[in-house]
Structures are given as C-alpha cells and as structure tokens.
Amino acid sequence: MGMSPMPYAQFRYLIIVGCVAALFAGTVFAQNNYHTLYTLYEQKQFEQLKSELNKYPNGSNASLDIRFFNALLEQDAELARQEYQNIFDHATGKLKNMAAGKLMEYYYARGYYVNAEKYHKFIVDNKAVVSGSGAAGETVSEKLAKTDTYFIQVGAFGMKDNAQELSQMLGTQDLPSRIVERNVNGKTLFCVWIEGKDSFENTLKYADKIKSKYDLEYRIIKP
C-alpha cells in the first residue's frame, strides 16, 4: 500500500519551519564568529584577529563589526578615525560604545581634550565599559588628573613676531602667557600658551571665558 500524498498545508508549514531554522542557524553562526573576534580583541591578540578577519569580506559593504576590527589594524590614523566616526554614527549598543572609546583615545592622544571629553561623556552617560580604552578602564578625566598643569593655546604662528605680538597684547590684559616652539607635521610653529587652572574642567571654563572676551579660539594642552 503506497503512502498518501502530504497535504499542501503541512508541506508549506515544513518549508517555513525549515527556512526559519536555516536563518536562525546562520545568525547563530555569525554571532559565534563575531564573538571570536571580540574575544581576540579584548585579549589583545591582534595577529590572530588579523588572521580571523581574512575570512570576512572587506570594504564598505562589510558589517560595522568587521569594519571596526579592520579599523584597528589600519596604519593611517586619520583613516581609522574616519571609520570609527562612521561606525559611531550608525552603530548601536556595545559597538557604538567601542567606537566612542576609540574616538576618545584618538582625540586625547592629539591634545584635543574638548573632543575627547565629548566621547567620554557619551560613554559615561551610556554606562559603557569600553575595552582597550586605557588601563583598568581609565577615563579621560582620570588620565588628565595625573598632570598638574594645563595650558590654553590661543594661537600658533609660523612667525615668532606674530606670537610675540599676541603675547604682548595678552600681557596688557593681565593674562601672562609664554611662547612655545613646537614642531607640527614637520613645520615649526610658535604657540602662545596661557597657564590653566588646577583641573581640566576648571581650565576649560577659564578658556571659555577667554574666548568669549577676546574672541580667541583655543586648545587645551597637556605638555
């Protein structure tokens, strides 16, 4: 006696269940793979991370997770920053927080403390724990607190005479300053620094007052 044909409704149900199971399996597989990448990153095993990334497609069509890990290996710091910014703008959750951490590190390392504090604030507001953002989760404020002296750079000139002119003008306003010679991208600049306050936050407030009164753009500097 032959088997009776399977009812259409039952057949359709089995097809749907099979598709859902395959999709779920693929999602779990991808998540497990990403988990490996995150684990290698948190363990700072960058050579193995680089090897693992070869299994995934690169470029603008890659997932934000993969683009983040590729940015870690990018030799050009500015290109890496652009990628982190793109990830921060489009990602959510842990990945967004990790991108914020990398942007915070980038700006902190270059002395752009106002920008760095912006991303630090985002991390704190979201109660994020960002791997690799410093020893024992060290924050920007904690890093800055290690230095007793902050300076407000209110000008950077290619000619020393221009720096001296600004410094003298500030002196007439009871704002003592110093001229510091710095090499930036192979170019000598004469920078005018005003001594800051006893903390980063107080120095920032002081710099805002100077900008408001004298219309001077500034950078917070930690020598």
Image (cartoon, grey):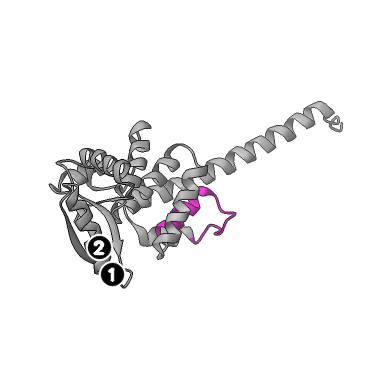
Where's residue 108, x and y in %? 29, 51
- Please tell me the numbered disc located at residue 140: none
In the depicted structure, whether residue 160 falls above or below residue 31: below
Where's residue 210, x and y in %? 27, 44
In the depicted structure, whether residue 25 falls above or below residue 105: above
Where's residue 186, x and y in %? 31, 73
Taking 72 as reference, is 190 left or right?
left
Q: CA distance from mark 2 to mark 1?
A: 7 Å
In magenta segment, residue 123: no
- The part of the image, by quadrant, that contains residue 48 is bottom left
Specify few, some or many for label 1: CA neighbours under 10 Å numbering under 14, 14-19, or 20 or more.
few
Residue bounds of the magenta highlight = 54-73
Residue most extreme to the front: 172
- The part of the image, by quadrant, that contains residue 188 is bottom left
- Classify the position of the C terminus by image quarter: bottom left
SS at mark 2 in the image: helix
Taking 96 as reference, is 9 left or right?
right
Specify few, some or many for label 2: CA neighbours under 10 Å numbering under 14, 14-19, or 20 or more.
many
Residue most extreme to the bottom: 186
In the depicted structure, whether residue 223 falls above or below residue 88: below
- What kind of residue is marked 1? Met
- Residue displayed at 38% across by 49% down: 103
- What kind of residue is marked 2? Ala
- Residue displayed at 34% across by 37% down: 121
- Classify the position of the N terminus by image quarter: top right
Say whether marks 2 and 1 touch (CB < 8 Å).
Answer: yes
Any part of residue 147 in sight: yes
| Residue position marked by numbered label 1 in the rendering | 159
Any part of residue 137 in sight: no
- Please tell me the numbered disc located at residue 163: 2
SS at mark 1 in the image: loop
- Residue displayed at 43% across by 58% down: 80
